[in-house]
Image (cartoon, rainbow, N blue to C red):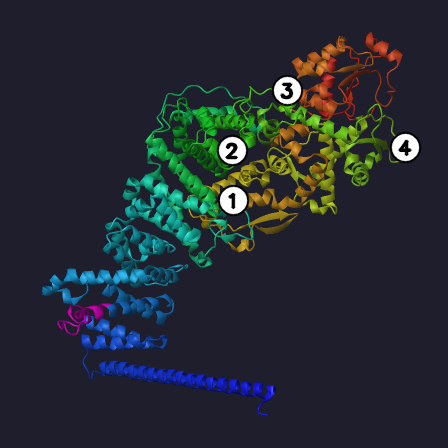
Amino acid sequence: MFSVPQSSKSEFLDKARQAREERKGQKEKERAAINIQALVRRFLCRCRLQKQIRKEVDDYFQAAETGTSKRNALSIFKIARKLLFIYRPEDKMRFEKLCRAILASMEVENEHKVWYVSLALSKDLTIPWLKQIKDVLWTCCQLLKNLKPDILQDNKLVTLYLTMLVTFTDTSTWRICRGKGETLRPALTRFCENIMGHLNQKGFYSMLQILLTNGLARSKPSLSKGTLTAIFTLSLRPVIAAHFSENLLRSFLIHIMSVPAIISHLNVLTPECMTSIQTHDLLRKFILFLSREEQCLDICVCLEGSHTLCLLGNLIQLGCLNEKVLEEEANHFVKDLTDMLSYCQRYVSQKKSNLTHWHPVLGWFSQTVDYGLNESMPLVTKQLQHLWGVSVIRTLFSDVLSKKLESQEPTPPPPQPSTSQNNLPVKNLFKRAFQKSASVRNILKPVGGKRVDSAEVQKVCSICVLYQTALSTLTQIRLQILTGLTHLDDLLPKLWAFICELGPQGGLKLFMECLNNDTDESKQLLAMLMLFCDCSRHLITILDDIEVYEEQTSFKIEELITISSFLNTFVYKMIWDGILENAKGEKLELFHSVHGWLMVLYERDCRRRFTPDDHWLRKDLKPSLLFQELEKGKKRAQLLLQYIPHVIPHKNRVLLFRNIVTKEKESLGLVETSSASPHVTHITIRRSRMLEDGYDQLRRLPVNSIKGVIRVKFVNDLGVDEAGIDQDGVFKEFLEEIIKKVFNPALNLFKTTSGNERLYPSPTSYIHENHLQLFEFVGKMLGKAVYEGIVVDVPFASFFLSQVLGHHHSTFYSSIDELPSLDSEFYKNLTSIKRYDGDVGDLGLTLSYDEDVMGQLVCHELIPGGKTMPVTNENKISYIHLMAHFRMHTQIKEQTAAFIRGFRSIINPEWLHMFSTPEVQRLVSGDNAEIDLDDLKKHTVYYGGFHSSHRVIIWLWDILSSDFNAEERAMFLKFVTSCSRPPLLGFAYLKPPFSIRCVEVSDDQDTGDTLGSVLRGFFTIRKKEPGGRLPTSSTCFNLLKLPNYSKKSILRDKLRYAISMNTGFELS
């Protein structure tokens, strides 16, 4: 009866548990309330205390300002302790007043109790005072980091806090040390050193770097002379105090010397700071510190690329300003710069990617770029330019430049033949060049004799490595570097002389051995060669013909011949010995460098000869072996044809070209075989509208149809077919006539150059409604002529052919070099501006070109807004190149592009890479050599009773060889073939072959050979004396129709008259 139900028991336990939890929660609330109350009371207490202290501080400064109380060091110390105890960002104004009060106390005369620093001598206050001044000065540092010197109010505070730092890091301004107090200076100096040590640990140099960067990393510095002097003085004090320890030198290099262009600003604003640098011999200390590879790498890693570049610029300018140190420490200086540039080079990228950033000096860079430095990059670039300035180059290359190129007695040069109009002055040129150069100095040729492991050679090699590293690292100012290195006229010749002396024999053998070695010594020697090639190529590219051939700036003509021979052999050996196939990295760069310099010389020689005959050929290379290797797909043969086809005789290259064309015809099914005939395209042409009909019927044809067989049927205006069977002969006549019409300047598709009357697209061809389609058609027709081996007498301007070959896309192409081929007089006028010694602005020129276009004066701006921009001494070189580019490219850009499009649709541009510009002209128009009559006689076919022993034929060959001069022989060839030049591969390749036919009647009565006419011709039986008739020709068949004259004199006179009147071109 006393039992309790189970449910009541659980309820009781639940209530007890809840009661416990409520009591626990209540206690926690009470505890939390007590904590909150304590925090609030503490906060309020602190606020009251801070308010009270701030009031005391304010009252103190107010009393001092009104003069109601007198300050002393102890009172300042106490008030400073209170302020530092409660210091918050809102107390900046109070801290400013404290700093002013401290500085003011230091200026008082003869009252040592007022001097704030006097507390350092108090036994009880020394340590507290030292701690306080450290706190005050570090607070100054933290405030300085956030100030902007270009804001007036901030600038005042910068001055104040810097004055605090300057005052308490050196005893020189402390009045307490004057007079009897001088004995205290050593002890007080140790206080300063202690203070500086504390600041260094906290990040003193980082603060100075931020302040300097804020004030100097801009186009115009915002730091005053006094401010900059104070900052630099502060930065130097710890280093001096530590006796230039490695740790402090490291901090100084990382934080101070890496500030953009700081040396440049110091040199301009505070010369006394530069004096201080020289007094402490800082440059030498920096050079020696960085000469240890691990320390230099440590600095570079800390700075990364952008700031390493700034450090580099500052060191270079310091070196330029301290020539004595630079001369004494040249080896270490060169090594330091090379190491830093090499570090940057690791991150220089050739192209944009997600991992790269753009840098105005380095280009695409795979490290983070500090874009805040971009504004100061022009100044940094200006500093870097000292490295390739005259003074530094003279100092570094002193061993090379001190070499004397002694004079010698001249010996006669070998005779130099001339083969073209461009080459007419070659003999005189060699004579003048030799007289000018041989009497001045030895012609520099490989002689050998200098040990490659000597200190002198090693030094020059390391300098070359430095500049080569700069060229590959500072990608955006590469041209500036090359221009600087080529400024001294004697540097490159003397460097070549130095190269000629290396090794036992000198020259090629040494460098070929280096290619097969992987030693550092070999790499340095190859770097020297690479630098020489890069600089020389740049120099020859920017020199005009007068400077190269007449004035012979830097190199003499004979030296260019020697150098080109060396380069030609070097490149040939690299390719033929299989070195290029496996080359990569530095070896590949070397190849492109040497090959680039070689091709610049070769192209210059193609424009205007300076080398002897067969200079570029390799006598040890058998064309047959090369062609066999090409057939087998051998890599070295392909590379040789790609890079230096000029080492193969021209005739062999033409044969190779014809073989390539033949193979393509076979692959396209354009050659008749036993099993198939090629597709033939038939066109009907009215003679009176030959161009219009040809254009209408051929322009729509597919390219392969134009490459194939085309049969032409001529009709007269009444639509009646002309007699004649076209077995390529009539098509040849049609092609020649079309080409003759479209290239006639009267049509205004093409114009002739002034002087030598060579053809180029007319800038005003737009008067024809469809002129661009016409240009494309003309390109196809000329391409067809070349494709079929039909030579046409079309002399092109060389600048236009260069564009057809794509040379104008080359990095080394110079418009000004090609300008004489357009207008030699205009070229002379432009180059006279380049040489004008006075102020070019006086000439009244602008960056525009005025032209008379069909009676109207049209002004072409060379650049946007050019007609308002005057030509000055600074931009005259740009003006010359812009003008040349406008005349030869911009004016005819569309016409040239259309012509090239048509030409390349027939002729693969890769096929023409094996020919130079003059050689392509020969491919189009035939050989410009003397006509080989023996070759012509050997490949002549006779008809109508004529034979090789016929007296008329004997007379003909005798007249051509003995009575006619070269010009008349050319006229004869043009009379019978329509081209005054022989085929490139000789008359065996003239299609159809040259033939001579005996005729008895006039062309309109001629019905062809009959048995009677053949017999009469064979036995010299004449129906009647043909003395009144002239020889005629059918150029479409390369046929000479010759009456059976009775006397040699009659044949000579009639033939001379016929070729001078050009009475050929009738169709048989």
Quarter occupied by the N terminus: bottom right
Q: Which residues are magenta?
A: 108-130
State the image coordinates of residue 855 (x, y, percent, origin top left): 65, 48
Q: What's the CA distance linking mark 3 and mark 4?
A: 52 Å
Q: Is residue 607 visible?
A: no
State whether residue 937 is above or below residue 191: above
Mark 3 or mark 1: which comes first in sequence?
Answer: 3
Cβ atoms at labels 3 and 4 below 8 Å apart: no
Q: Secondary structure at mark 1?
A: helix
The residue closer to the viewer here, 296 or 1039, is: 296
Residue plotted at (54% across, 46% down):
882
Would you call the spot at circle 3 few (<14 residues within 10 Å), some (14-19), or many (20 or more)? few
Badge 4 is on which residue? Answer: 720
Mark 1 or mark 2: which comes first in sequence?
Answer: 2
Quarter occupied by the C terminus: top right
The three-letter amino acid code for the residue at tag 4 is Val
Q: Secondary structure at mark 4?
A: loop
State the image coordinates of residue 488 (x, y, percent, origin top left): 39, 38
Mark 3 or mark 4: which comes first in sequence?
Answer: 3
The three-letter amino acid code for the residue at tag 1 is Ile
Mark 3 or mark 2: which comes first in sequence?
Answer: 2
Cβ atoms at labels 4 and 2 below 8 Å apart: no
Toward which corner of the image does residue 670 lie, by quadrant? Answer: top right
The three-letter amino acid code for the residue at tag 3 is Ser
Cβ atoms at labels 3 and 1 below 8 Å apart: no
Q: Secondary structure at mark 3?
A: helix
Badge 1 is on which residue? Answer: 880
Q: What's the CA distance linking mark 3 and mark 2?
A: 26 Å
Would you call the spot at circle 4 few (<14 residues within 10 Å), some (14-19), or many (20 or more)? few
Give residue 617's mark. none
Q: What's the CA distance linking mark 1 and mark 4?
A: 58 Å
Tag in front: 4 or 2: 2
